[in-house]
Every structure is written in C-alpha cells, then in structure tokens.
Amino acid sequence: MATIPGTYRHHDYTIAWISALPLEMAAAVAMLDERHPDLPTDLSDNNSYIFGSIYGHNIVIVCLPAGVYGTTSAAVIASQVQFTFKSIRFGLMVGIGGAVPSQDDIRLGDVVVSKPTRDYGGIVQYDYGKTLSNNRFERTGMLNKPPSVLLTAISRLQAEHMVRSSNIPAILSDMVCRYPKMKDRFTYRGAEQDVLFEADYDHEDVESTCANCNPSRRKSRPDRGYDVPVIHYGLIASANQVMKSGRIRDQLANEFGILCFEMEAAGLMDNFPCLVIRGICDYADSHKNKQWQEYAAATAAAYTKELLSMIHTKQVVDMPSPSVALELAQYGLKAPVGTETYAGEISKSLHIDIGQLLERISNYDHDKVHRRLAYKRLPGTTQWFLNHATFKSWLTGLDQSSLWCSGKIGSGKSIIAASVVEVVKYRALENSSYHCPTVFFYCENEHSGSLQAFYILASLIRQLAQLLYESHQSFPPDVARELERFFGRDRRVPDYDDLREIFNLLFSYMPNTIYVLDGLDALEQQECQKMLLLIRATFSSASPPNGSKIMLSSRNHVPGYVNIATFMPWFLRISTFNHVTQDIEFYIKASIDDKSMLRKLTSDCSLLEEVKRVLLAEASGMFLWVYLILEILWSTCFTDAEVHSALRRLPKGLKETYRLCTQRISSDPRAAKVLKWVSFATRPLHIEELKEAVAFDLHDTCWDHAKVPQDEFVLGCCANLVVLDPTDGCVRFAHSSVKKFLLSDRAGHDARYLESEARGNLESRTGSQFSRLGSSLASFACR
Ligand SMILES: Nc1ncnc2c1ncn2[C@@H]1O[C@H](COP(=O)(O)OP(=O)(O)OP(=O)(O)O)[C@@H](O)[C@H]1O
C-alpha cells in the first residue's frame, strides 16, 4: 500500500536487520536508501530501532544491547522485534565473523552466507547436544532453514555473479560518498594486512598485535590480484563462545564443513525465519584482532543490500508472518501466498476473488518489466534527471501536471522512467520523502499485442483497481458495477471505449496519482494517437486534475505527430540531450572496470584513457552504442595496435554498429539460431530453454545432454546483441532496435535469419517429441 510522507507505522516494516555490534549497525544504516522517522515502542520492548528502506523494503534495524552478545541475547531481541512489528516476515542477521581458511580460499573482507546442506539448515550450533558416557559430545537438533524467498534470491544472485561482477564495490563507494566519515575505518585494509598463521601456531603476546609473531609461521597464499570481496555460501557455526583457536576451529570445520564462526545466529533460527550473512574480520584463531571489523561489517551489509535488490517487495509482503509460518510449519503446512493482501471477496456485489479479477483485467506483469529496467540502472546515474529543477517542480508543484522526457534512441529514457517510478512508488526522493500511488507502463514489444492502446489501458486499469482496493478494501458501487460487468460474472468483452470509461472512473477515484508512460513512440501511429488523445483529454491543462500527474518519455518524434510538445504545449519538457554526458562517462568507466576484471584490454593506462575519451566523444548521448562498442573492443582487440586501429574505425551510429556485430557473427550458424529463437518465440525464453532449443535440429529425435551448449556460449556468440536478464533468467535482445535492425537489414547479414524459415523451423520443432523440451516448447509457437 502506498505510504503518505512521514506516516510509516509499525506494520509497514517487513524485514528486521539484526546487528550484534554498533559498528555493524552503522554499516546497516549506511545501506539505507532512505531513513524514516523514529517510532515509539512498547515499554516492554527495550530495543532501540533505526528505520528506513532499501529498494522499497521497509526495514527496521536493531542492535543487541552493548556488551551483551550471544545466542540468548539474539533470541530475546528476535521475540521483542516480532512483538512490536507484527508484519516482519524475516530477519537478516548481518555482521562480522571469523573464517575457516582451510575450507575455502576465504580472505578478510569476504562474505559468508548461510546456506542449507542436506544435514543442516545453514547454521550449526556446535555447543548444543549431549555429553555421552565416554566423554564424547554428541551434537543434536537441526536449526531451521532460511525462508525460501531468501534462498531463491541467493540462488539468483549466485547465478548473477557468475555472469557479472557483484555490486558490492559500487555499493561501498556509494556509502563512502554519502558518509565520508566512514572512509577511514569502513574501507579495504590492504592485502598486506591480511595475515594468516598456521593453525597450530599460537599468538605470541596476548596484549599486542602480531608484530611479535613469527613471520615464518605465516601461511603463504597466492595474491588474489583484486580486492573485491568473494562470496562464500555454506554452513556457519554458531555458539555462545568466541572461537579463538586455530586447532579447534579446524577440528570443528572438518567435522561439519563449516566456513565461518559467529555467536548469535543459533538464537534466532528456530524462532524467526532468518538468513545469516557474515563479513570476515579474522580467522577465528588466537591472532584474532579488530583491524578488519568495520570493513567486514560493510562488505556483509553491502552484500545484504545487493541481495535485497533481488527480492520484490510484494514477494516479502506475500509471505506469511513468522508466527503464522512457525505455527503452520509445526503441522507441515504452508500459508497460501497473498492471503493477507487479498482476503476474501472484493465486495458483496462481486462474485470473484480480487486476484482473479485483476488477472482478468490484464495479465501483463508491469512490475516485472519495471524490475528489469530498474535493475539495469548503474547506481549513481539518472540523478541529474531527479535533481532537475523542472522534474522537481513537476513532482512537487501544485500547478504542473504533465512532463515529457524526450531524447534520442538508446539515450536511457526507459531507465530514467524506471528511476522515476522507483522514487515515487518504492522510495522517497532524498530529503523530501515524496510517496504516492504510481501507475506505469513501459511500451515493449515483448508479448503479442503489448504495443496496442487497448493493452496499455487494460494494464493501467488493473493497477488503478489494485491501488483503489488496497486503500479501501472494497470498491465504490459504480466501480464494482463496471468491473463486474466486464471482468466479473457477466464477462462482457470490453472494447477500447469501454476501457476508456472504466479508466476515467477509476482515475476520478484515485487522486494524487502519478502516471509514468515510457516509449509511446514504439506504437503504430493509430495506437499512439489513441493513447495521446486519451492523455490529452485527461490532462487537458497545466494544472493537475485531482492532483494527478503524468510523465511521458519518448523519442523526439512520435508517430502521427511532430512531437508531444506540438500536440500538448503545456507539457514541461526535459531533454536527455546534453544532460546524459556525465552519466555516460560514468557508465564507460564502470563498464570498463567491470570488463577489466575478466580481461584487461591494455596495460597502457594512457591508451585506456584514450578509449574512454573517444567513446565519450563519439557516443553522442547513446548508452546503447557505448555498450556495443565495448563488446566489440573486448572481443576483437588483443594488442595495443588493434585497440588503436579499432578506435580510428569506430562505427558511427547504431545501424553501422549493429551491422558490424552481425558481420562478426554471421559465420557462426549457432549465432543465427540464437537470434532466430530470441526473435520469434512468442515469449522470452529462459536461458535453459534457449540452450536446448539451440542444441537440437529438426532431424534430432531424442534427447542428448552432450549437445546442450553452455550459458556462456549462447550469450557470447551473438556479439552482445542478446543479453541474459538476471531478474527472470530469460534471454532478450539488448534493445528492441536490434530485432528491427535484423529484420530490416536482411541483405546485410546471414540469409539464415529469415522470418519465414524461422517460422517453419519453430513450428516443426514445437511438434516434435523432445523429452526435455516438451512443455516449454509447446507453450510457444511462432508469431
Ligand atoms: N543509467 C543507465 N545505467 C545503466 N545502463 C543504462 C543507463 N541508461 C541506459 N543504459 C543502457 O542503455 C540501454 C538503452 O537505454 P534505454 O532503453 O533506457 O534507452 P531509451 O532512450 O529508452 O531508448 P528508446 O528510444 O529505444 O526507447 C539500456 O538497455 C541499458 O543497457
């Protein structure tokens, strides 16, 4: 439900972030996108809380009382948190821990995340059990696993990190930018300060640092060559005692396969669905000291933030609350998803469940598209737009209802639109906490019909109906009547005019709503005109009707009109032209840093600076061009001379660049296959589906696993024209213009990429009897 500024209540908070030490709490606070005002707590709740949000999740941060650590203290905290915040769905125990270096190549500053194994739920309470007569100690009991929403997010993030580097460095530099005071203590300490001694060599002098320890007893480990923290997934040991012995550490680690030691998790796991994340600050031996604690707390917090970006707020809200979940778990039951949001019938006059009703209005997953675009944004970019005086006056002013963001192809307008949606729907603008109901649509040719006015309007109606229902738990009678007529028992098939009327009705019941529509230029002329006429009729003057506002983003020209400003002159306008240069510069630098982790383009720093300079000068405002050129440079240049030569012959504009990409891949028949499948499947294919589709031909009659290519091949063979979408694991074109280019420029590339042939191929394939492809292939046919 949308939250009005300054009115967060206890029940708005769904995630508890638990820290054991103030320095861990500080790292947690530094991760907040937005800090919320304090809330009063019950007299019986002695905790002190800090409130805020990350990626739209409302989070309460709590710290154990000063000097009181351990499992018992954590258990008490957990029960108080649950008492005060009834909507908390799970906890994140985030802080520092001691590593077991023998289990994995774990270094100080790395992060260990608790992950269940066959025998344990992720945490091993090694001091819990019974002493047997022969003086042996038998560990008993298995602590609960983290909730599945977190385990799924972990898997997704693990997969992500296999294809791209983690966002932790970016999150940490953002932290230092926002909180310069943290720079001294919460940043990387240096590889030379990361010293590991042999497990059986004890610290020489209890009072001092390792200055007196024998350097010859240091374990030599290869230089990693990078300082980005590595994430390790596995078992974490928890007990009420500090682990300060290399020998016992390794003994326990060998017994359980433990990666890390800490002291609180065991107190939480059985009372509270929880995930434990530990930044490594020492090696749990007698040399243990505090030098790395702050940085380790920061890396664990940054990982947690990245993990939260993998989880949608609705997934959390739809989880049963821990008390319900624990109760149901005792009976081996699971709570039905979404019961809290959509309980029962929508009103007496309606005869279907609200969820079913919304699905009937539109089954388009607008939120998923949003997540994908928001995810693409490089942190730190699009800020120029959000800080633009015109944007601010549109968002907060009383006399401006309409804004148009215009710009050329690939200049980042969709990403800007997604940033605006993030700001107004899921978080608040820095220092202004502006939150309001938000309805949005990104025009993408992802599903058949999705570029039609009817389809867009249906999605807007669905979102408005959902917002209205969530705020009142029922519909006004006239709305209920209309919804019943078309989407309830009567199910009359609506035409565009019917939808327009329903939209107008809902619009009038939803004041102060923000509408964001991106990419109307992708529509055919007639469809675009329908949408623009509707927008003009609804937002017919500068001042906002019922306080609602609209932001359109599109290319400069829209089908049927010279541009939006000539059709609706009262629209405020912000052009990306000239404004995105700084973002593009940042994007070039970040992309080069990213790519250099895998392979350095050159070791000549001045040449690398030259690459950056030329790219910035030639990009002419297009992120997309930069993205493609970087791939070309990295996959075709292996000497400095080749880099110099490539820089002199850079393709101008997107068309020339696409042509170069397709020329490079045209000799590879498998690349043509990938392009065909990505083009003509009626829905985006999951990478696993695509790999299978590419693996087999029409003459194949049985499944042969050995033919299935690797992910890297499928993604790498098309010169970055297709990309893996980490939010759903599907493979899509890097941009909608790629498909248009491929279809329009057939003469310029491989003739195998012909629609008719692709159709025939796919149609025959869906009819064949692959054992594994089965249902997935049958579910999409050709357009
Ligand atoms: N702020 C950003 N951070 C990271 N990547 C970006 C950013 N802006 C743009 N990009 C990259 O450039 C691509 C093109 O951006 P986007 O789709 O937003 O352009 P557009 O202006 O909406 O294009 P079109 O006119 O075709 O709709 C994106 O898919 C993304 O890969």
Image (spheres, rainbow, N blue to C red):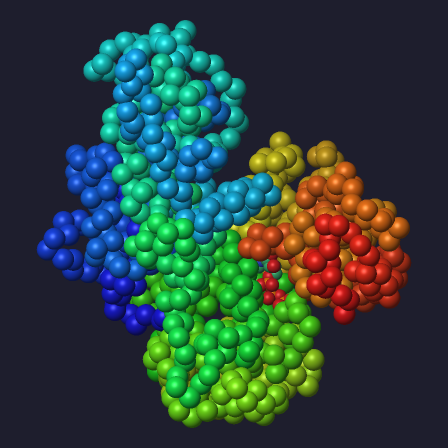
User: Residue 41, position in %: x, y?
Assistant: 16, 57
**Which part of the image, by quadrant, shows the N terminus?**
bottom left
**Which part of the image, by quadrant, shows the C terminus?**
bottom right
User: Residue 60, position in %: x, y?
Assistant: 28, 54
Asked whether, in this view, residue 556 is left or right of residue 346, the answer is: right
User: Residue 566, position in %: x, y?
Assistant: 58, 86
At a point 55% along the width and 68% down the height, the residue shown is: 365
At a point 16% along the width and 60% down the height, the residue shown is: 40
* Extreme residue in the left direction: 43
At a point 89% along the width and 58% down the height, the residue shown is: 751
Residue 68, compared with residue 16, is above or below; it is above
Q: Is residue 367 visible?
A: yes
Quarter of the figure with residue 145: top left
Quarter of image, ligand 1: bottom right
Quarter of the figure with residue 519: bottom right
Asked whether, in this view, residue 135 is left or right of residue 765, the answer is: left
Residue 630, compared with residue 757, is above or below; it is above
Residue 595, compared with residue 201, is above or below; it is below
Q: Is residue 170 visible?
A: no
Asked whether, in this view, residue 545 is left or right of residue 639, the answer is: left
